[in-house]
Every structure is written in C-alpha cells, then in structure tokens.
Amino acid sequence: MCGIVGYTGPREAGSILIEGLKRLEYRGYDSAGIALVDEDGDLFVEKKAGKLANLQTAIADRTPHAAIGLAHTRWATHGRPNDLNAHPHQDCTGDITVIHNGIIENFRELRDGLEARGHGLTSETDTEAIAHLIEESYTGDIAEATRATLRRLEGAYALVVMHRGENRLVGARQDVPLVVGVAEGESFLASDVAAILAHTDRVIYLDEGDVADIRPAGVVVTDVHGAPVERVVTTIDWSPEAAEKGGYEHFMLKEIHEQPTSLRQAIAGRVTRNDRIWLEELEGFDETLRGIDRVELVACGTAYYAALVGAAAIEDWIGVPARATFGSEFGTARRRSTRGRS
Ligand code: GLU
C-alpha cells in the first residue's frame, strides 16, 4: 500500500502533488500517476510504471494550471505493475477519478457485475471497480455517490475521489491510514503527514469509516451514511524530515516497528476471504504443480534471506524438498547435488 496526495486550493496543484509524492518515495512503489482538473474543467491524467521521475518526465512542459487534483504511488496487489494498472482510474464517462491504497476483497464479484451491466473496465485492478460503481450511484453529488459505493465494498482502503465538474475531493478510509491537512483557503489529503507537512502542520487523522468532503474553504467529515462526525485538528510538531520517520528516531527503528503491518500488506492481495492463499498466476497449472518433486529458490542479497524463509515454508506446507541458493553459486550447487543424487 503506497502513497496518496490530494490538493484543492489557490496554488498550482501539479507541483504540490508531485512534491508530496516525493516525500512518500521512501516507502517504495512500482508506478505513479496524477490527475488534475484545469481552469476550463478539463481533466488531465498521466500515469507511468517505474520511478516517479518517469511521471515527471511525462508531464514536464505540459502540466496544466490546476487548482485541484490527486496523485498516487502504487504498490500493486491486483494486476501487474504497468502504466495501465497505475492509478488514477476512471469510470466510463471519464468524469470520475479514483486513487486507492489497499485491497477490495469482493472486487471479483463487483467487476463481474459491472461488466455484465455494460461497463468497460480497462485495467486489471480492484480499484477501477470503485470508479464505475460511483458512476452508477452518481446523481450530481460526488460525496453521496462515494458513500453509496463504500457501503458495497469489502476490504481495506484509503481512497480519494474527484469529479471533473465539482470543486471538491472526497477521501475515505477503512483499515488504511488517511489524513486531512487544513490550512487557510486550501485543503489536503494524504496517506501520511510527511506528504503535506511542508504546507500545513494542522491535520485531522481520519477514523475507520470516515468520509471527508474536502474543499478549499474547509472540511466536513461524515460517517459512511452521511451523518456528520466531529474530528479534532491536531497540530504536528515534527519537521518534514522527522515526519518521514513517523516520529521514530531512525528509519531502521520505524521499519522494525512496521514489520507486522508490512508483512500483512505484502500478502493481503493473496489471501482470500476464507483465509486461503490464492496465487492467480498459477491458475490452470494444477497438473504441472503436482508433478514437481523439488523446488530451487535462487536469490541474492536480501532476497536470499527471503528465499531461506520461502524454502522452509514450502517444505513445511507442501512437503516437497526446497533449497535456497545464491545465484552466483547456483550452477555449482546444482552440479554437486545432481552428482550426489546419482
Ligand atoms: N489494490 C490496488 C492495486 O493493486 C492498490 C494498491 C496500493 O495500495 O498501492 O492497484
């Protein structure tokens, strides 16, 4: 789960959003994207696999003047990390734009239903379904349509929604962090305060189930049914640098404390609702898999440690011999073990 930044106010949204994504780069990601509504109400969207620099190059010299927009760095859970699957995602009309951190567990049935009702989904993501569901509920109020959609989602999300014709952003969270930044005449949304701390030190940490309606003049927070809820504005006294470390003294300490969450997030897209592991890429290979009598994991550096854990897990769960080997030694190790066996 990666980075979210949203902005609405009098300044250039494009540069504020890209700068915010840079502040979140330390988290790692596989692609990045941005959507802006320009002064004429036209939507500009660009998204690129790989480093944020790829996105910056793609929008250099053609970023429109815009006072509202959203941007995202993705860590793929559903669908390959490529340009098409990168966020933002849109509905059929192209008016509704969504970015999302997290996983929609019932995405398969939602996507199937949308396709049966004639929607053309262009990506492999769970996220795109959200944009089309909002389209179905939309009757002129993007916050209302978002809330109606949230009531149909199962899973974890922090999301930001924008309609080309409405000067507001809607943020919502469930089991994934999202903060609102408040300032004079402008408002922000971010997955992490580090993204917006250069602009404001006043933030609202949204609670589970909160929906925030963000406009330049201020923020209204409701529950998923539209009932207003009171949320306190907290003043952050960290510097932007300290914020990146989440208040910990060192990145190392922060990352140690993040281990349970990181592990949970890393496998979350592979765990089904009845707690089974599901590897989409292996579907249709049952026969081949049953014929495997040993597994070689070839790796290097940190990946070697992961391979050691993987080998132990494979032996334990599947009962097939498994071995981790350094890439540089693999040929020799293989020859040795082949000779040993004969
Ligand atoms: N599940 C979404 C996807 O795969 C969001 C991933 C994220 O949290 O970055 O596109």
Image (spheres, helix red, strand yellow):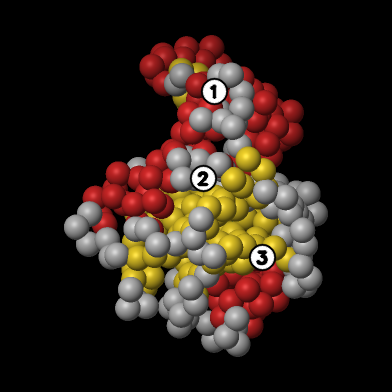
Horizontal relation, residue 45 to residue 62: left or right: right
Tag 3 residue: 220
The part of the image, by quadrant, that contains residue 111 is: bottom right
Three-letter residue code for mark 1: Phe
Q: Amino acid at mark 2?
A: Thr
Q: Residue at x 49, y 59 (%)?
A: 186
Q: Is residue 86 visible?
A: no
- Report if the beta carbon of the residue with label 3 is closer than 8 angstroms to ligand 1: no
Between circles 1 and 2, the one closer to the viewer is: 2
For label 1, the SS is helix
Q: Mark 3 packing: few (<14 Cα in 10 Å), some, or many (20+)?
A: some
Identify the amino acid type marked 3. Answer: Val
Query: Residue at coordinates 75% horizontally, 72% vertically from top-left?
Result: 226
* Element type where label 3 sits in the image: strand
Residue beneath disc 2 = 200
Q: Which of pointers 3 and 2 lies earlier in the amino acid sequence?
A: 2
Say which mark, if any, is on residue 251: 1
Distance in Å between CA atoms under marks 3 and 2:
18 Å
